[in-house]
Amino acid sequence: MPEAHCEAPTAGSVILAGILLKLGGYGFIRFSIGLFPDASAYFSPLIFMVSILGIVYASITTMQQIDLKKIIAYSSVGHMGVVTIGIFSYTAQGILGSVFLMISHGIVSGALFLCIGFLYERHHTRIVKYFSGLHTTMPLFSVFFTVFTLANIGLPGTSSFIGEFLIIAGSLLINTLGGLFCATGMVLGVGYSL
């Protein structure tokens, strides 16, 4: 997915992150849990482990990226791991938080990809090191980019916080270790976002 985002134009990245990425979560809720509840319950420990590995791997990989589109793309991978943990926690809080986080992530990541598209159109690069001092040349843009980055982190008061909080609350009821690793992934998310 990160390579697809880097090659896609801005509109393609917005559609990919805002709509297409959410189809997997919708499929899990609608078909996996709805049609095959026993099989989903049987494989939920495996899905928890794969999701936790995905969150931690995506977060650590994101910290090493220098391309802004890849940073947002890898953070999307981590967020979808959190959504999967919420879905397979089989609690009302977890599933509601997953739906809320998918909606929030669609808006926030789409807005971040739009911001990066604006930067690319103006400066013809997406490499992070070339954007130091951007707040002096583009102050209004910097405010919007900062607000959407804080929403991507899940700062209290944003829609992502509500979804992430519900997912952690739901997963802690079922699998305490999984909930702690999920929260650790969110702490790593603060690291790569800043």
Image (cartoon, helix red, strand yellow):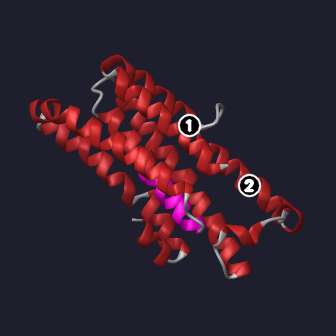
Q: Amino acid at mark 2?
A: Phe
Number of disc labels: 2
Pick the front one: 89 or 193 = 193
Question: Is residue 79 shown above or below 137?
Answer: above
Marked residue nearer the N-terminal end (1 or 2):
2
Taking the spot 55% from the left edge, 73% from the top edge, the residue there is 10
When asked about the image quadrant of residue 1, the answer is bottom left
Q: Amino acid at mark 1?
A: Val
Read off the magenta span: 67-77
Residue for badge 1: 187
Q: Percent position (x, y) of residue 108? A: 57, 51
Neighbourhood count class around disc 1 (C-alpha, 10 Å): few under 14, some 14–19, many 20 upward: some
> Tag on residue 144?
2
Q: Percent position (x, y) of residue 109? A: 54, 55
Left or right: residue 126 versus residue 95 is: right
When asked about the image quadrant of residue 117, the answer is bottom right
Taking the spot 72% from the left edge, 51% from the top edge, the residue there is 146
Asked if the stretch drawn in magenta spans residue 103, the answer is no
